[in-house]
Image: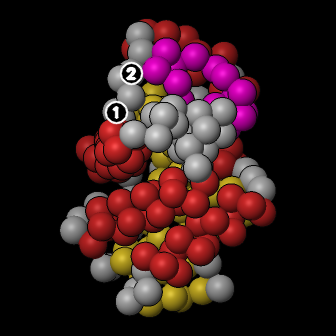
């Protein structure tokens, strides 16, 4: 499913983020930037051991921020490690999640990326409620795309139907006035 956001495209697709042919993929990282489970573990495995070495050299990343490394063995040139919040049911959680998305988009722009793929940050072991996280992600990315032209494609990639459906519902809710260009 594709949406027109200003001159840019926001896509929702099922699949494996590790196989996306985009300039950068986003890793739903922990603040230590070490390989974990889920998306993070899959990205580290697909990129090869050089990714862990590069992450160790960075030394960590605060919640709500992101860091960038080469993609190594991935199709993507870069991996952007975005650290979303662990869910604690505080208003600060939403602010930190939004900040993680904006930080990743900003890093991608600074590195001349035209395309980027995101997972559903913080919705796995970090426990962020899927519906709420999807709304924050869609709204934040759409607003970013409306006001810049460096990134022409943002793709959300989901490995399961539940996450895909939550994001599709959020897109219908938050992008009601946006042109749908694919289904």
Residue 102 position within the rendered picture, expressed as x and y whole percent measured from the top left: 32, 49
Q: Residues within 10 Å of mark 1 (few under 14, many from 20)?
A: many
Where residue 162 sits, quadrant-wise, is bottom right
Image quarter (top left, top right, bottom left or bottom right) of the C terminus: bottom right
x and y percentages locating residue 98 in the rendered image: 36, 49
Where residue 61 is drawn, which disc sits there?
2
Instruction: Identify the residue at image location x=56%, y=43%.
Output: 128
Contact between marks 2 and 1 (CB within 8 A): the answer is yes
Q: Which residue is drawn at 51% across and 74% down?
A: 171
Q: Is residue 81 left or right of residue 143?
A: right
Can residue 76 be seen here? The reply is no
Toward the front, the furthest residue is 89
> Where is residue 63 shown, x and y percent of the image?
38, 28
Task: Name, please, the residue furthest toward the left.
Answer: 147
- Quarter of the image that includes the N terminus: bottom right
Relative to 87, is 108 above or below? Answer: below
Q: Name the residue under label 1.
A: 65
Residue plotted at (51% across, 57% down): 132
Q: Name the secondary structure under disc 1.
A: loop
Q: Position of 135 compared to 46: left or right?
A: left
Q: How far apart are marks 2 and 1 (CA)?
A: 7 Å
Mark 2, Cα crowd under 10 Å, few <14 / some 14-19 / many 20+, is: some
Asked if the magenta segment contains residue 50, the reply would be: no
Left or right for 134, reference 49 = left
Depth check, front residue: 174 or 2: 174
Q: Can residue 179 be seen in this view?
A: yes
The circle drawn on residue 163 is none
> In percent of the image, x 51 and y 37: which residue is there?
87
Number of numbered discs overlaid on the protein picture:
2
Q: Bounds of the magenta span? A: 27-43
Q: In this view, does 181 lie above or below 116?
A: below
């Amino acid at each position: 499913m594709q949406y027109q956001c200003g001159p840019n495209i926001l896509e929702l697709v099922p699949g494996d983020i590790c196989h996306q042919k985009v300039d950068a993929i986003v890793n739903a990282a922990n603040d230590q930037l070490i390989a974990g489970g889920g998306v993070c573990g899959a990205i580290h495995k697909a990129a090869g051991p050089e990714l862990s070495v590069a992450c160790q050299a960075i030394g960590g990343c605060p919640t709500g921020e992101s860091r960038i490394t080469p993609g190594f063995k991935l199709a993507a040139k870069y991996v952007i490690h975005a650290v979303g919040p662990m869910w604690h049911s505080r208003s600060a959680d939403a602010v930190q999640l939004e900040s993680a998305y904006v930080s990743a988009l900003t890093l991608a722009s600074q590195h001349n990326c035209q395309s980027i793929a995101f997972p559903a940050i913080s919705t796995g072991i970090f426990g962020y409620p899927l519906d709420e996280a999807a709304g924050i992600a869609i709204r934040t990315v759409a607003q970013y795309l409306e006001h810049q032209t460096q990134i022409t494609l943002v793709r959300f990639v989901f490995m399961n139907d539940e996450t895909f459906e939550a994001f599709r519902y959020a897109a219908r809710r938050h992008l009601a006035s946006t042109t749908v260009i694919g289904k």
